[in-house]
Amino acid sequence: MSLLAKQKRFTVSVDQADYEALVALGQSVSPPLNLQYLVRLSVRNLLEQHAAQQLSFPLERRP
């Protein structure tokens, strides 16, 4: 079974400013990184920090 078959897909909406910042971040490295990779990396880092009880910010919703 391929790695792709084990992945789960979902949709997320972000503010325009956050989207533009992600695009700029991806384009700032060589070779450029796509948004999908940056989001997967971010999610993985968040979950690893949470598992290690080392989150640098509280998990609460913004108004």
Image (cartoon, rainbow, N blue to C red):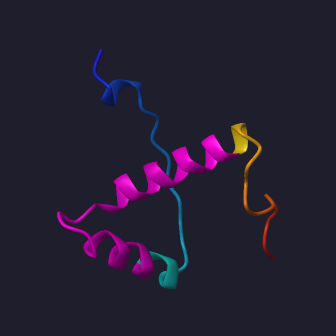
* Secondary structure character of the magenta stretch overall: helix
Where residue 47 sits, quadrant-wise, is top right
Kindly identify the residue that appears in the image at 42 percent across and 32 percent down: 7
Quarter of the image for the C terminus: give it.
bottom right
Quarter of the image for the N terminus: give it.
top left
Q: In the rendering, at what x and y percent does residue 62 appear?
A: 78, 73
Where residue 38 sits, quadrant-wise, is bottom left
What stretch of residues is rendered in magenta? 20-49
Q: In the rendering, at what x and y percent does residue 31 appear?
A: 17, 63
Does residue 21 sit above or below 13 in this rendering? below
Q: In the rendering, at what x and y percent does residue 36 appear?
A: 36, 55
Kindly identify the residue that appears in the image at 73 percent across and 54 percent down: 55
Residue 41 within the magenta-colored segment of the rendering? yes
Does residue 20 sit above or below 4 in this rendering? below
Q: Is residue 56 left or right of residue 8?
A: right
Q: Is residue 25 left or right of residue 31?
A: right
Q: Nearer the viewer, residue 12 or 43?
A: 43
Kindly identify the residue that appears in the image at 45 percent across and 41 percent down: 9
